[in-house]
Every structure is written in C-alpha cells, then in structure tokens.
Image: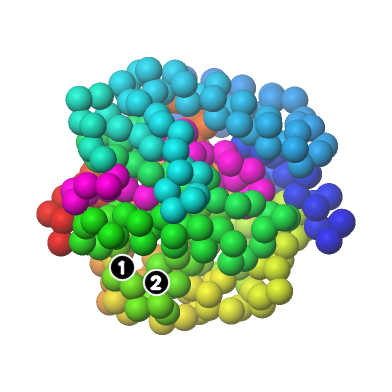
Amino acid sequence: MKSAIRAILAIPAICMAASAPAQIKLPPWSPELSQAAREGLEANDSRPAGPQTMDGRRARSEAIQQEIGQPRLARWKVAMEESEIAGVPVRIFRRAGRPGDWRGSGPVLLNLHGGGFFVDSGSITENVEIAAQTGYPVVAVRYRLIPEHPFPAAVEQALAVYRALLATRKAGSIGLYGTSAGAILSAELVARLKTDGVPLPGALGFFSGTANLSATGDSAALFADMAGAKAVAQLYAGRRSLDDPAVSPLIGELAGWPPTMCVTSGRDFLQGPTADFCNALRRAGVPAELWLYDGLPHAFWAYIDSPESDRAFADMARFLSKSIGAGK
C-alpha cells in the first residue's frame, strides 16, 4: 500500500500521467500546432513539482481547476453550481439563458472527471464548453477517491447519481462521458448498469481511457511512467482482479452498449487502449467512432486553452447532442 501511494504521488496532478516521463526522447511540440497550444503545453511542462502529500496534491489540483476553469466559465457564459444529488457531491453547469434543471425530463449530461482516481483534475475544465455548446445541463460527479476508497466506491456513487437522473427522464436522453480515469469509470458504469438491468444511457463519451486495466498497450510503454500507472490501477481495483469484467469491461460482453465516441491524441499514453476499446465495440456491433487529434498529449482539452481544445470540445458536443437530443 505505501509503495503504491508513493507511486501515485510521483504522478503529475493535472491528469493521470498527463506529462509523465516518456520512455523515448520525444521531439519538441509540433510547429503545426497553434501558438496557443504550444504555449499552453510549454507552460504546463514548466509547472513546478507538486506537494508530496495527498492532501497537498488534491488542493493543488483544485487550484489548477479554478485557475483554468473560471476564465472558461466567463468566456462561455456558463454558470456552475456546487450541489449534491443522491447524497453525492456534484458540480452542475448550465449555459446562460438555458437554465435546464437536472430534475426535469429533458436531455442531461453526466460527467465523470479525470485525475488518476486520486485527484479531481476535470470536474470544471471538462464540462464548461460541453454545457455551452450542447445547451444541456451537465452534472459532474465528484466521486470518492483512492487510496481511501477503492473500487467500486466511485462507480457506486456514479450509479446513485445516474439513477437520480433516470427517475425523471428516459435513459436515452442521458449522455454519459468522462476523460482519463473518468473514461474508465464511465465504461465501468455502463457495465454495472447492464449487470443490474438498468436502462443504458443514450450515448457514451470515452475520452482517452482504457477499458482493460489488466493490459497496458504500446502507447503506454512509449509515453507513460509504467510502474506508476500499474500501481495506480492495482490500488484502484482494490481486492478485485484487474481482469474482472466489472473493472475491465472490454473483457466482458459489449453487445448492446450505447453509441460511443472514443477520443485520443497523438502523444496520448492511452491512445492504444482507447483505440482497442473502440475496435472491440465495433466488432460487437456497437456504433462507435474513433477520433484522434495529432501531435497532442493525453487529455489536452482538460487543461490547455487553444483552438485544438475548442475543436475537440465542439466534436464531443456535437456527438452528444446528436445522440441524446431526441430523448429516446
């Protein structure tokens, strides 16, 4: 346990291994990226090392969320509310002039944030543009974190919030999405819904994740701190085996899953696992799209303000709107 926690504390707090030491020497950021993207990535790379305590890492991650998120809220004219649903802390986002209520019967989006399962590195920055561009309320679940709360604690809280949303609307009008650890949780939530016989959401946004924690993939070997990533996966799984389909849904039955958008990028350490999941869904007959943004690192949209991030959010919002807008 102590060695696993030390491995976690070695991972950058912005998102799980977002800037972890590469196993190969990478060229500089591509000159084909926008100036804003290059400047943002260089600024992120130059951030000083974070605190070496769990509380310190979480406080720093929240400070970064506010630092990046507050200007996004102002730019996109989105209101954020701190609240609780089913006893679970959430952040609710609404576009100005579109005060949709999560208790209503209309479309709603459910986000599970990234942060390597141990910090919150996306409950603001993953959601502002999605709320603005879809016009739908977004509910971001601030789920319990490791090492205090291993699997299935986060899934249980996500399930409680999903059931609350489902109480007033059809499942097809709920869109579920997450980035990094949140993508993993989103897939685990769908697997849990199938197991429990609960109606599935109308769409799944699987943004830079893995659906098989028992495997790593070539991109992880190239771009990630492998020892740290494996330690986090095992600590998250707790007493469960990493090849349990509840933890690694790709190993289970995928037929009947909701239409899915899989997103990754050229220097993403989860590029391979994201593509593997998309391919597995398609083989199971599930409508699944794979989007890749060249030259960019893991989950770049969650912490870099640039035209590339704007395009990624626009693509995500379009998919989610198309999939749940009819409120199936």
In the image, 275 versus 160, the foreground residue is 160
In the visual, does 81 lie left or right of 300? left
The location of residue 266, given as percent across then percent down, is 49, 46
Residue segment shown in magenta: 102-127
Q: Residue at x 46, y 34 (%)?
A: 82
**Residue sitting at the far right:** 2
**Which comes sooner in the sequence, label 1 or label 2?**
2
Q: Residue beneath label 2, please?
A: 193
* Image quadrant in which you'd find residue 310: top left
The x, y position of residue 76, in whole percent, is 32, 23
**Residue drawn where x is 29% and y is 70% of the image:** 199
Looking at this rendering, what residue extends furthest in the left direction? Answer: 326
Residue 31 spot, x, y in % from top left: 49, 27
Q: Is residue 32 visible to us here?
A: no
168 relative to 29, above or below? below
Does residue 115 show up?
yes
Q: Which mark is residue 180?
A: none
The C terminus sits in image quarter: bottom left
Does residue 110 show up magenta in the picture?
yes
Q: Which residue is mark 1?
A: 200
- Look at the numbered disc 2 and give the secondary structure of its residue: helix
Position of residue 268 relative to residue 126, above or below, is below
- Give the residue type at disc 1: Leu
* Mark 1 and mark 2 residues within 8 Å of each other at the beta carbon: yes
Q: How far is the residue under mark 1 from the one under mark 2?
A: 6 Å
